[in-house]
Image (cartoon, grey):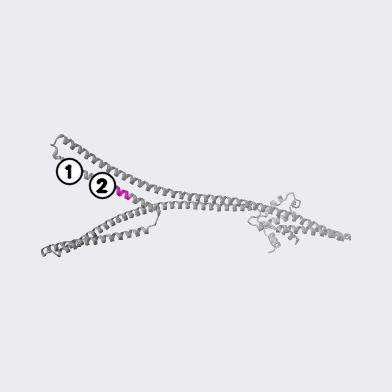
Amino acid sequence: MPVKNQYSELLKMSSPCEKLIRRDIARTYPEHEFFKGQDSLGQEVLFNVMKAYSLVDREVGYCQGSALEKDYTTIKTKEMEEQVEIKRLRTENRLLKQRIDTLEKESASLADRLIQGQVTRAQEAEENYLVRRELTTVKQQSEEASAQLEQAKNTIRQLQQQQQPRAKGPLRFSEESVLQLEQELVQARLKEAESQCALKEMQDKILDMEKRNSSLPDDTNVARLQEELIGVKLREAEAVTGLKELRQQVRDLEDHWQRHLARTASRWKDSPKKNTLSELQDELMSVRLREAEAQAELRETRQRMLELETQNQIHSNQLRRAEQESRCFQECVQTLTTQNKDLQVQLQEIKRRQAEIECKSKEEVMAVRLREADNIAAMAELQQQISELEIQKEEGKVQGQLNHTDSSQYIRDLKDQIAELKQEIYCLKGQRGLTSQPTFDGIHIVNHYMG
């Protein structure tokens, strides 16, 4: 629909703001001559413009404060969206903290599993060591059995060589010896077979344990802990062996003491000198017993100290790993905190830029509206001048006809002035067309009246 027809249709319609426009129209330009009269042309033109604008933009209407309310609603909506974004960031931060707590719990469980795995591998290493030691013992027994078998074979060979020159009587004795030696040979072979079976079982067990060890993950910490545990077990075995030796020495001393008491029981009737000597010997034996007991206690104390040192070292390693994991988690928390601060700074910067852009847009809108109002006023003045010039033109024509005078020059001057005024109107219309505001164009009033 052309703009002129649209304006005509708007003037035919009724606006709910007509009473408000009639009330405030005299206060719009109170000092301007064109708008002073109550039913003047200026007030009627301004009323038509304001009525058409209230019908075109029904959201704003006649009350210009509605535009500010609309802007306020838009700003409020953006603030609500920003608050929702902040809540989302806080929720993500809380979820990240929960994830950190979960990771800490998982790390603790993994540390427990690692310690359990290390203990299991240490036990397997100990079993491997015991199996190897048993294998060595079985090999020694097998070698001893082989040596005995070889010795029995040599003895049989010697006896067979001795049987040939002897008579029948001695031959019977040699046959009995041969049977006995054959029985010994069978027993030796049975022992050798048992040793071979035990050796094979030990070898299979060793291969199985080696496969199990190879299937486990190769970790330097685990290997180091295995070595430490093996060393601890070896020291413990040495300490237990030393303790057994001390106890054996104590038992030997006690047996020796009992034998000494039995020997000296029949000497109570001897001379005092011998009794004194026996008392000194008794004291010496008592001192040796106490010394052995003290050495045993010392060995036990050293063993306990080694166990405590080993436990202290294990606890120190666990504490060091826990501290390293704690530092890693603290660094992660610091990184997340820094990211959160950066996001907050970016959010504040975005808010500031948005506020600046809104202020600039409002200033531009106000400037455009002021220019539109000036253009409307200028066009109204030009239209008034055109109307006056047309009236003067008509009056000049009438006077020229009445007076029979040549008024063509006067009419041409009026036409030139009208053309100049129209040219100025076209210039103003071109300037108004450069603006990109979708508001109601007041130049349509001029087109309406010119039509």
Q: In which quarter of the image is the C terminus?
A: bottom right
Task: From the top left corner, tell me how far across and down residue 358 is, in percent.
Answer: 62, 52
On screen, 183 above or below 27? below
Left or right: 38 as drawn, with respect to 97: right
Q: Quadrant of the N terminus?
A: bottom right
Residue 34, magenta (yes or no) = no
Task: From the top left corner, tell me how far across and down residue 94 is, in percent.
Answer: 48, 51
The residue located at (48%, 49%) in the rendering is: 331
Which numbered circle lies on residue 259? 1
Task: From the top left corner, tell me how far across and down residue 278 is, in percent.
Answer: 18, 38
What is the magenta segment's predominant secondary structure?
helix
The residue located at (69%, 55%) in the rendering is: 50
Q: Residues within 10 Å of mark 1 (few under 14, many from 20)?
A: few
Nearer to the camera, 421 or 284: 284
Residue 235, magenta (yes or no) = yes
**Of pointers 1 and 2, the one earlier in the residue sequence:** 2
Task: From the top left corner, tell me how far across and down residue 297 is, in percent.
Answer: 28, 42
Residue extent of the magenta highlight: 233-242
Mark 2 belongs to which amino acid? Glu
The residue located at (62%, 51%) in the rendering is: 356
Q: Residue furthest right?
A: 404
Residue position marked by numbered label 2 in the rendering: 245
Nearer to the camera, 240 or 307: 240
Where, by quadrant of the figure, is residue 305 drawn?
top left
Q: How far apart are marks 1 and 2 (CA)?
A: 21 Å
Nearer to the camera, 135 or 419: 135
Left or right: 263 as drawn, with respect to 135: left
Question: How many dots with numbers?
Answer: 2
Q: How crowded is mark 2: few (under 14 residues within 10 Å), some or many (20 or more)?
A: few
